[in-house]
Amino acid sequence: MISSVPRSVKLWGRGQLTVPKEMREALKMDDESQLNIFVVGKCLMLTPKRLTRSALAGQVEKSMKEQGLSLESLLADLKTERQRSTSELYDG
């Protein structure tokens, strides 16, 4: 499952957040699942703890090919989303 549609989540006390149910189900995560978190530029990336970086890179590349996504289109979408978020934050 690759979703290019962003999901909004709220940070709760002590920086906790809830991963949406459909995403947890797609990744077969339960209450005991652990995640890795990475900072990529000004973005946070969460991955199931069982993945290593090279395995993650391979899975992302495979999923992008299956969905017909290129790195350029992904980066363009991120730029558009960042602009939309910035506009909402500062203009509206």
Image: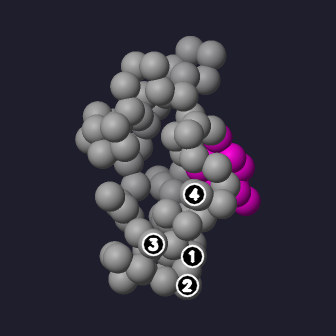
Q: Marks 4/1: CA distance?
A: 18 Å
Q: Marks 3/2: CA distance?
A: 15 Å
- Which residue carries the number 2 mark? 72
Q: Residue at x 64, y 49 (%)?
A: 52
Closest to the observer: 51 or 14? 51
**Residue 41 within the segment the image draws in magenta:** yes
Q: Please, what secondary structure does the residue beneath circle 2 have?
A: helix
- Residue 25 vertical position relative to residue 66 in the rendered view, above or below: above
Quadrant of the drawing holding the N terminus = bottom left
- The answer to whether residue 86 shows anywhere in this view is no
- Mark 2 neighbour class, 10 Å CA radius: few under 14, some 14 to 19, many 20 or more: few
Can you tell which of label 3 and label 1 is closer to the viewer? 3
Closest to the observer: 89 or 71? 71
Question: Which range is magenta?
Answer: 37-45
Asked if labels 1 and 4 touch by Cβ distance under 8 angstroms, the answer is no
Q: Marks 1/2: CA distance?
A: 5 Å
Going by the image, does 30 lie left or right of 77? left
- Residue 69 vertical position relative to residue 49 in the rendered view, above or below: below
Q: Marks 4/3: CA distance?
A: 10 Å
- Label whose residue precedes the other's in the sequence (4 or 2): 4
- Mark 4 neighbour class, 10 Å CA radius: few under 14, some 14 to 19, many 20 or more: some
What's under tag 4, amino acid-wise? Answer: Leu
- Label whose residue precedes the other's in the sequence (3 or 2): 3
- Which residue carries the number 3 mark? 62
Closest to the observer: 39 or 82? 39
Residue found at the very far top of the displayed protein: 13
- Label whose residue precedes the other's in the sequence (3 or 1): 3
What's under tag 3, amino acid-wise? Answer: Lys
Asked if labels 2 and 1 touch by Cβ distance under 8 angstroms, the answer is yes
- Which residue carries the number 1 mark? 75
Q: Residue at x 66, y 60 (%)?
A: 54
